[in-house]
Image: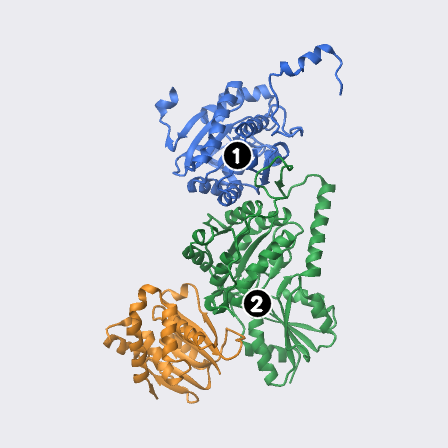
C-alpha cells in the first residue's frame, strides 16, 4: 500500500489529473468544484509535468479549448458544476460528434437555473441521455469516494481513448468537498508518441490531411456516421458496465443508489439489517452503460427496490426499465441541496413496502 | 470503534481546521476517517460546521443526522444540533456567548471556557485547540503525538513555529474541561 | 482528356505557365458564389503556407458560416469549430503545440457577434495565433441577415428597411477594438477585390504567420469583402458598392504594427 493522503474529492481529482499524465486542463470557477483549478494552480503542473493549465473566459470557451486540444490527440480535461456543465453541452455534442476523447467532471449542485451550491444528483438525465443536441452518449462514471475521484481519472482517460469519446465523471458537492483517505497512483508519463492517424498536428507528406468535424451535409453519409456512433455505444454497453454489490446475496429488498447516495445507503443497509430486514445495495459505478442486466437478474427474487436519489427521480427510470415490471420500484428522494439521512432512508424502505 | 462527531460554530473560529486536525490524527493511527464540511457563502462570517468520522471500519455515509459527540461553539449551533446527539452521547460547548444552555438529561454535557482561556493565553488562534484538548480529555481516541503529527500535516510549513503554542493549548483544554 | 488543338496545346505548355494553383488548395470546386472574396483569401493563405514550407506544422480552424467547409478546400489539417468558438479552439491547439502555426478563419457573425467573448479574450491573452476575419457586413450562409458589421441604413433580410442604429445598434468595429488590447501584436484591415489589394493582403498574411515565431502576440487581419448574393448585386456592382460604402467606414490599412498602434499621420503615407 502506498502512502495515504487526506484530501478533498476535488483536490484528489486534480492531483490525479497531473499523475494521469494529463496534457491540459481548461476550466472556469464555479462552486462547489473551484478547488480543482485552485489545486492545479498551486501545484504548477507546467513545472511538474509540462501540463497546460488555463483559466478560460467562460465554460463555453473552456470546453472549446478542450475540443481543440483533444483534436490534436492530447489527454485533456475540464471540470465544472451543473450550470457550467449546461453551458458546455454544445461543445460536448461537438466532441462526441467528432469522436474526440476527453474527460469532463461535473460536481453536481442543485438546479434548475442557478439553483443552489449544495449537492444534488439532478443532472443524471443530462449526463446519461445525451445532454447536448443529437444522438450521442458518453461513458458516465459515478465516484462515491475520494479514492474514486482519483482512480476514475486514470480509468476515464483510458476509456475516452479506447472509444475516442468524451467520458464524464458525475460527482456531487458531497464527494467533491469531503476529505477522506486516498491512495494516489504513481505518476503516469505524459504521452509524447501516440496514434497520429486521425489527429490534427499538421499534414505530413505521408498522409492525407486530417479534419476534425462533426458536419456532413450528405444525409446518406451522415446516417452512416450516426450508425457507426451507435455501434460504438453498443460496444460500451457490452464491455463497460461497472457496479458494486453490497449485501445483495440474501437480500429481499434492494437499494439502488450511486455516488453520495450510495454512501448514505451503505449505512442504511447496516441500520436495516440490525432491525432484521434483509436489504442490499446495488451501486451503479457506470451510469451509462447502466447495470440493467444485474438489476434485472435479481428483480424476480426481490420483494421491492428503493431507488435513492438527490433528484426528482431520474435514475429510477433506468431501474424500472431494467426490472421490466418484475418487482415494484419505489423512490426516496431529496432535492434542492437537501440530503437524506441513513435513518430516513430506512424509514422510506419500511413505508414504501409496508415492512413491519 | 466508530465515533461520529459534529463540530459547529462561527466561521473563523477554526471549526473546519479543528476537524481537519482530528481527521489527520486519526489517519496517523490508521483509522478510517472522513471530514465533510458545510460549504459556500454561509461559511464567510456565518455558521460553519463539519462532520468528522473516526472508525475502525470502512466509513459508509459521510452525512449524518445523529452524532456520538457534538462540539457546539455558538448559540445557533446549540439550537440546531443539541437534539442530534445520540442518547448517552456527548455534548461539549463553550458557554461564552451562550444564552440558552443545553437542556437534555439523557446525554453527558461538558463545558470548556475556551474563549476566555485563549484570551488569557493572548492568542485567539489557540481557541480551537483548547476545544480539541477538551474533547480529547473526554474521548482519548487519538494521542497527543498524533495530534502534533496532524498539525504538522495540515499546517503549511511557514506556520510550523506555532505548533508548540498549539500543543500548550491542547493541554490547557484537557485541564479546564468540566463535566456538568 | 487529350487536347488536340495545337493552339491550345501551346497555351497550356509548361514554358508558358504564368500561374499555377498551389497544391495546398484541393481540387474540389469552391462552394462560394461567383465573385465572392472567400476563394481569393483561401488561396492566398494556402500560398503562404506553401511558400513558407509549413504545411506539416500548420493547423487551421474553420468557423460556422459560409466558410464552414473551408477544410474541403484547404489541403491542411483542420478543425471545424462551433459557432464563434474558433479562437478558443485555436487556443486549445496552440497551448498544447506552441511550436505549430495555428490560424482561425472566421466571418463577421461568427467572430464579432456570437464569438465576441472568445475573440476579445484570445486577443487579450495574446495567443500566438493568426485570426483571419472576413467582413462582408451580412450573414451569407443563412440567407443575408443583419451582421454585427452591417452598416447603418444597409438592407438585409432582417433589416429590410435598412439598419436603424436606434433599434439595432451600431456596426461594430471589432478590429479597432482588439487593436487596443495589449495582447495583439499586429492588426490590419485589407481587401481582396483588386490585384493590388490581393498583393498587399498577401504581405500582411505572411507577416501573420511569421509573427507566430516571435511569440509576441496575436495577429489579426480583417478582410473587408463583398457578398453579392446577400447584397443582391452583381459582383462588379458589389465591389463598387463596397468601395463607396464599406471602405469609408472600414478603412483599409495597418492599425497596429509590432505591438504599437499606427499613428494617423503614418497611415496617410
Foreground mark, 2 or 1? 2
Mark 2, residues whose alpha carbon is within 10 Å: few (<14), some, or many (≥20)?
many
State the CA–CA distance, disc 2 to disc 1: 45 Å
Compared to C35, does A250 lie above or below? Answer: below
Which residue is tagged 2?
A: A259
Instruction: Please tell me which residue lies in front, A306 or B149.
Output: B149
Compared to B3, does C233 lie above or below? Answer: above
Residue at image x 62%, y 78%?
A349
Instruction: Please tell me which residue lies in front, A80 or A162.
Output: A162
Q: Chain of mark 2?
A: A
Across and down, in percent, residue A345 comes to: 58, 76
Q: Quadrant of residue A343?
A: bottom right
Mark 1, residues whose alpha carbon is within 10 Å: few (<14), some, or many (≥20)?
many
Task: Provide the secondary structure element on which disc 2 rests.
Answer: helix
User: Are callouts 2 and 1 both on one chain?
Assistant: no
Which residue is tagged 1?
A: C108
**Can residue C174 be seen?**
no
Q: Quadrant of the C terminus of chain C?
A: top left
Q: Which chain does green denote in the image?
A: A
Q: Which chain does blue denote in the image?
A: C
Task: Provide the secondary structure element on which disc 1 rests.
Answer: helix
Residue at image x 45%, y 35%?
C213
**Can residue C205 be seen?**
yes
- Please name the color used to draw chain B: orange
Across and down, in percent, residue B66 comes to: 48, 80
Q: How many marks?
A: 2
Amino acid at each position: 500500500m502506498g502512502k495515504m493522503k487526506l484530501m478533498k474529492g476535488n483536490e484528489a481529482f486534480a492531483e490525479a489529473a497531473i499523475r494521469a499524465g494529463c496534457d491540459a486542463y481548461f476550466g472556469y470557477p464555479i462552486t462547489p468544484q473551484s478547488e480543482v483549478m485552485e489545486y492545479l494552480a498551486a501545484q504548477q503542473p507546467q513545472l511538474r509535468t509540462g501540463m497546460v493549465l488555463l483559466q478560460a473566459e467562460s465554460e463555453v470557451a473552456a470546453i472549446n479549448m478542450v475540443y481543440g486540444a483533444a483534436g490534436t490527440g492530447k489527454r485533456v480535461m475540464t471540470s465544472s458544476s451543473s450550470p457550467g456543465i449546461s453551458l458546455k453541452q454544445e461543445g460536448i455534442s461537438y466532441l462526441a460528434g467528432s469522436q474526440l476523447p476527453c474527460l469532463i467532471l461535473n460536481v453536481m449542485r442543485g438546479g434548475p437555473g442557478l439553483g443552489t451550491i449544495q449537492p444534488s444528483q439532478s443532472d443524471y438525465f443530462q449526463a446519461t441521455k445525451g445532454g447536448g443536441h443529437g444522438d450521442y452518449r458518453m461513458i458516465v462514471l459515478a465516484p462515491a469516494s475520494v479514492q474514486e475521484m482519483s482512480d476514475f481519472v486514470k480509468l476515464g482517460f483510458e476509456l475516452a481513448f479506447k472509444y475516442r469519446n468524451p467520458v464524464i465523471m458525475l460527482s456531487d458537492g458531497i464527494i467533491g468537498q469531503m476529505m477522506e483517505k486516498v491512495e494516489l497512483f504513481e505518476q503516469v508519463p505524459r504521452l509524447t508518441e501516440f496514434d497520429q492517424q486521425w489527429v490534427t498536428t499538421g499534414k505530413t507528406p505521408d498522409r492525407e490531411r486530417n479534419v476534425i468535424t462533426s458536419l456532413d451535409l450528405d444525409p446518406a453519409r451522415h446516417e452512416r456516421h450516426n450508425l457507426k456512433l451507435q455501434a460504438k455505444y453498443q460496444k460500451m454497453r457490452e464491455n463497460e458496465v461497472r457496479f458494486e454489490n453490497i449485501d445483495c446475496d440474501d437480500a429481499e429488498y434492494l437499494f439502488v443508489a450511486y455516488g453520495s447516495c450510495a454512501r448514505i445507503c451503505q449505512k442504511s443497509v447496516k441500520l436495516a439489517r440490525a432491525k432484521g430486514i434483509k436489504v442490499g445495495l446495488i451501486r451503479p459505478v457506470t451510469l451509462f452503460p447502466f447495470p440493467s442486466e444485474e438489476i434485472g437478474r435479481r428483480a424476480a427474487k426481490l420483494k421491492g427496490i428503493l431507488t435513492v436519489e438527490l433528484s426528482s427521480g431520474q435514475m429510477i427510470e433506468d431501474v424500472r426499465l431494467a426490472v421490466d415490471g418484475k418487482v415494484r420500484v419505489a423512490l426516496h428522494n431529496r432535492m434542492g441541496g437537501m440530503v437524506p439521512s441513513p435513518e430516513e432512508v430506512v424509514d422510506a424502505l419500511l413505508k414504501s413496502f409496508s415492512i413491519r | 470503534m466508530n465515533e461520529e462527531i459534529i463540530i459547529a460554530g462561527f466561521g473563523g473560529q477554526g471549526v473546519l481546521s479543528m476537524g481537519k486536525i482530528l481527521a489527520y490524527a486519526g489517519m496517523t493511527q490508521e483509522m478510517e476517517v472522513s471530514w465533510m464540511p458545510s460549504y459556500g457563502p454561509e461559511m464567510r462570517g456565518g455558521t460553519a460546521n463539519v462532520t468528522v468520522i473516526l472508525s475502525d471500519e470502512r466509513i459508509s455515509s459521510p452525512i449524518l443526522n445523529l452524532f456520538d459527540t457534538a462540539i457546539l461553539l455558538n448559540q445557533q449551533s446549540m439550537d440546531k444540533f443539541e437534539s442530534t446527539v445520540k442518547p448517552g452521547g456527548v455534548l461539549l460547548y463553550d458557554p461564552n456567548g451562550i444564552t440558552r444552555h443545553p437542556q437534555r438529561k439523557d446525554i453527558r454535557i461538558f463545558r470548556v471556557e475556551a474563549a476566555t482561556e485563549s484570551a488569557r493565553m493572548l492568542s485567539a488562534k489557540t481557541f480551537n485547540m483548547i476545544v480539541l484538548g477538551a474533547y480529547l480529555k473526554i474521548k482519548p481516541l487519538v494521542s497527543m503525538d498524533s495530534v502534533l503529527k496532524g498539525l504538522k500535516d495540515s499546517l503549511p510549513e511557514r506556520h510550523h513555529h506555532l505548533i508548540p503554542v498549539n500543543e500548550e493549548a491542547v493541554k490547557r483544554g484537557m485541564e479546564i474541561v468540566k463535566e456538568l | 482528356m487529350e487536347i488536340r488543338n495545337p493552339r491550345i496545346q501551346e497555351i497550356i505548355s509548361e514554358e508558358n505557365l504564368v500561374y499555377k494553383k498551389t497544391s495546398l488548395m484541393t481540387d474540389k470546386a469552391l462552394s462560394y458564389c461567383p465573385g465572392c472574396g472567400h476563394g481569393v483569401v483561401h488561396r492566398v493563405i494556402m500560398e503562404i503556407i506553401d511558400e513558407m514550407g509549413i504545411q506539416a506544422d500548420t493547423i487551421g480552424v474553420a468557423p460556422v458560416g459560409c466558410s464552414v467547409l473551408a477544410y474541403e478546400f484547404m489541403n491542411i489539417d483542420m478543425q471545424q469549430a462551433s459557432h464563434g468558438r474558433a479562437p478558443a479552439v485555436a487556443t486549445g491547439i496552440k497551448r498544447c503545440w506552441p511550436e505549430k502555426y495555428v490560424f482561425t478563419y472566421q466571418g463577421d457573425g461568427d467572430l464579432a457577434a456570437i464569438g465576441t467573448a472568445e475573440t476579445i479574450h484570445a486577443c487579450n491573452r495574446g495567443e500566438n495565433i493568426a485570426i483571419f476575419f472576413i467582413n462582408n457586413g451580412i450573414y451569407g450562409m443563412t440567407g443575408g441577415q443583419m451582421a454585427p458589421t452591417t452598416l447603418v441604413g444597409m438592407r438585409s433580410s432582417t433589416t429590410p428597411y435598412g439598419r436603424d442604429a436606434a433599434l439595432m445598434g451600431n456596426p461594430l468595429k471589432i478590429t479597432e477594438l482588439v487593436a487596443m488590447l495589449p495582447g495583439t501584436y499586429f492588426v490590419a484591415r485589407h481587401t481582396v477585390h483588386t490585384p493590388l489589394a490581393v498583393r498587399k493582403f498577401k504581405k500582411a498574411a505572411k507577416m501573420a504567420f511569421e509573427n507566430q515565431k516571435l511569440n509576441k502576440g496575436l495577429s489579426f487581419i480583417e478582410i473587408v469583402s463583398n457578398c453579392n448574393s446577400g447584397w443582391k448585386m452583381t459582383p462588379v456592382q458589389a465591389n463598387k458598392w463596397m468601395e463607396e460604402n464599406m471602405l469609408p467606414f472600414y478603412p483599409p490599412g495597418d492599425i497596429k504594427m509590432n505591438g504599437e498602434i499606427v499613428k494617423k499621420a503614418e497611415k496617410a503615407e
